[in-house]
Image: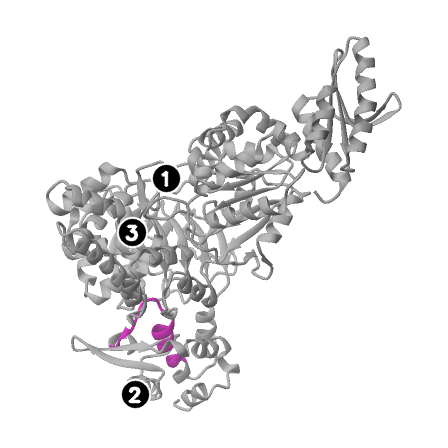
Amino acid sequence: MKSWKQLEEYTRGLASTIWKRPAKAERIGGVNFDAVIHVSEDEIVLIEITEQFTLEKVRSDISKISALKMKYATEGIFARAYIILDKEPTAGMKDLGREMKISVISIDDFIKTAFDYKSYVTLRTEVAFGSAINPTTGEPDNQNYIPVSYTDETGRRNYDLDNICDKLERGEKIILLGDYGTGKSRCTKEIFNLFTQRTSNGSKFLLAINLREHWGATTAIEIIAGHLQRLGLSDTVDRTMQLLRNGHIILILDGFDEVGSQTFGANQDRRASIRKLALQGIRELVTSTPSGVLITGRPHYFNSNQEMYEGLGMLSRTTPATLIQCANEFDIEQAKTYLENIGLSSSVPEWLPRKPLMFLILAQIDSTEAEKILSGSSGEIGFWGQFIDSVCEREAKIHTSIDPVSVRDVLTNLAKYTRQGDRPLGRLTPKDVNRAYEAATGMAPDESGQLMLSRLCTLGRIEPESPDRQFVDPYIVQLIFAESLAEDVSNKNYEILNENWRQAIQPIGLYFMAQWIELYSLQRDTLAMIHRMTAPTNGQVVGELVAALLLLESDPLDFGGLIISASEICLLSLGITAMQNVKFDNCVFDTISFESCKVTNESEVKITSSSIAMATGLTSKDALPKWVVDTSIENTQSASNASRIKSSNLPASQKLFLSIIQKIFFQRGGGRKESSLYKGGFGEQYDRKTIDTILSILVNEGYVEKSKDNSVFIYNPKREYTAKMKAIRDQLGLSKDELWLRVSSLS
């Protein structure tokens, strides 16, 4: 407690909650009491808070109070009396009070009569905080915490754990956003621990609630009761609700996006209505307390910040909620520290996804195998392929009854079940897992197979007490989504057109898919899949295949009057390859990129009755082209470097150079085929001689490595020059880089 006066005020607040009557300082019979509660005509509560920890002071207070108790007794009024000390009273002090029926207790013991917070802290720290768990055992994540900063919307202001605790103590509302695996749940655990350490006598209580455990709860008391019952504290529900409403409880609510099914469909208002209904209990909980609240969830769950504030009960003009974000990844130093903490000596590869959860997965793998994965040089897609291969080979070595190919088939089957479920990472029951094994091997899992299934490091427990599993990282599930779809295209598995996919591929998976189409020359097979049925049940797969093709440079694509309906498309890029004769109807787009748009009014392309979360390359919503009809758009983003380059007066050689380094250094994945580099770019025509010269300079001067794979030349970036290339690309005509100036002389 910061001051004695604050302790007195806090004690009065607790007393009001305990006896459900106002507690006020009052002078009675010439004695000043810090708190007096008139419970009824026949009962009164007298509280004296003493700062002096001496037997003489306690004896003096007892003498004054006992005389007043006797007076009240003669009037038929029962007087309950407390002397509250800052620390545990001595046995002598307690004995003096006991003789006169006066309770001499510490502030801790008085707090305990309101709420046994120390027991709560003990029980709460024994169970997991949200998804901060060991993916293999389901037990709480106990890896050393790597300190990170959180930023505001602008990215200019940083917050650490102490800053967040300060805000909560001041009664502020905070929303923490972050993608899966970026450390939101671990943040709530560290805030809880820090808050408990920082605060002691007379401080507010803090409850940390995993919202995923309260799926479908529609009231505040349902959430509080369910939380306390899980900890064995069900007898404290009523008192907790009183403390909450009186402002004595701070809340940490982890996972607002996990209290209801993910909704699909292009009717934006309908989806918003479903979300609002699912959040009804959370909204009541947040508005029930005047104290601080920290609530976490994934970005893009809501259509807009306005909907988010309204849905969470944090829409206030006087005290607006603070919106902060997790960094998507560790920085290099944080990643290096984590690897050292788990006993790995490898440096951090440039292409390694540095999500906290990714490092937690690496910690579960044998150190020799983890070192091998980290030392690979095949880039992002190669890393994930090698990562999955290593997992499958590892399990096959441990459980000799199954081979690596079958382990991978099990994962593919589980990903397919996830595609049809209502959770992005799946909720896979033991029956689902066994079914996936049987489909992959042709037999039910034996004891060894059951053991392997229970400890696959790509699958994790959703909560310790549940046998259900989920994929532990979106990168993994997206890789398998993409790989599975590529195999379906290659194997002409048209049956998927009749399935009902509820989980859409995300940008990382879409880029993987596009690379596999190019790597294995599946363009014709992809078009055959797209045109196989006039009105497939699974419009999702058609939308994803079209989006993947549009990421590849090719001749214009004529889709022959194709109608794509009810598809959720994460990214539609309109500036790489021209398309024509296609209609997107009743679709949901996370992002449409209009930069260098190759669709014209003559292309016979239409987007109708759809919704767009983000349109890049547009200065405003009013800038939508005429072929986008009856479609809502949430946000726009001004034109990017691509437009700047295309509209600039740079010489042709520099524009071709920028096109080449964009493909080699900045597009996802590893190296680039030679054929993909011998094209025009940024509005410039193809010029073989100039491109030959540029590639020769890049290779001979060590910026790029040239290798041969199956009779095809591959150009791989030297990652130490990524920053150099980025500076050239950002500065353009202002750049004085020697390489940039040399290229300019080629025109």
Circle 1 crowding by C-alpha within 10 Å: few under 14, some 14–19, many from 20: some
Q: Amino acid at mark 2?
A: Lys
Please give left or right for residue 185 compared with residue 21 in the image: left
Q: Amino acid at mark 1?
A: Pro
613 or 737, which lies in front? Answer: 737
When asked about the image quadrant of residue 93, the answer is top right
630 or 27, which lies in front? Answer: 27
Q: Nearer the viewer, mark 3 or mark 2?
A: 3
User: Where 204 sits versus 637, above or below?
Assistant: above
Circle 2 crowding by C-alpha within 10 Å: few under 14, some 14–19, many from 20: few
Q: Disc 3 or 2, which lies upstream in sequence?
A: 3
Q: Secondary structure at mark 3?
A: loop
Tell me residue 316's x, y (percent): 64, 41
Q: Secondary structure at mark 2?
A: helix
280 inside magenta stretch: no
Q: Which residue bears the numbered disc 1?
A: 464
Q: CA distance from mark 2 to mark 1?
A: 63 Å
Q: What residue sits 29% from the left and 53% below the top?
A: 544
Residues rendered magenta in the picture: 655-674
When asked about the image quadrant of residue 499, the answer is top left
Q: Which residue bears the numbered disc 3?
A: 457
Secondary structure of the magenta portion, mostly?
Answer: helix
Circle 3 crowding by C-alpha within 10 Å: few under 14, some 14–19, many from 20: many
Q: Which residue bears the numbered disc 2?
A: 689
When asked about the image quadrant of residue 306, the answer is top right
Q: Nearer the viewer, mark 2 or mark 1?
A: 1
Residue 314's disc is: none
Tell me residue 4's x, y (percent): 76, 40
Q: Disc 2 or 1, which lies upstream in sequence?
A: 1
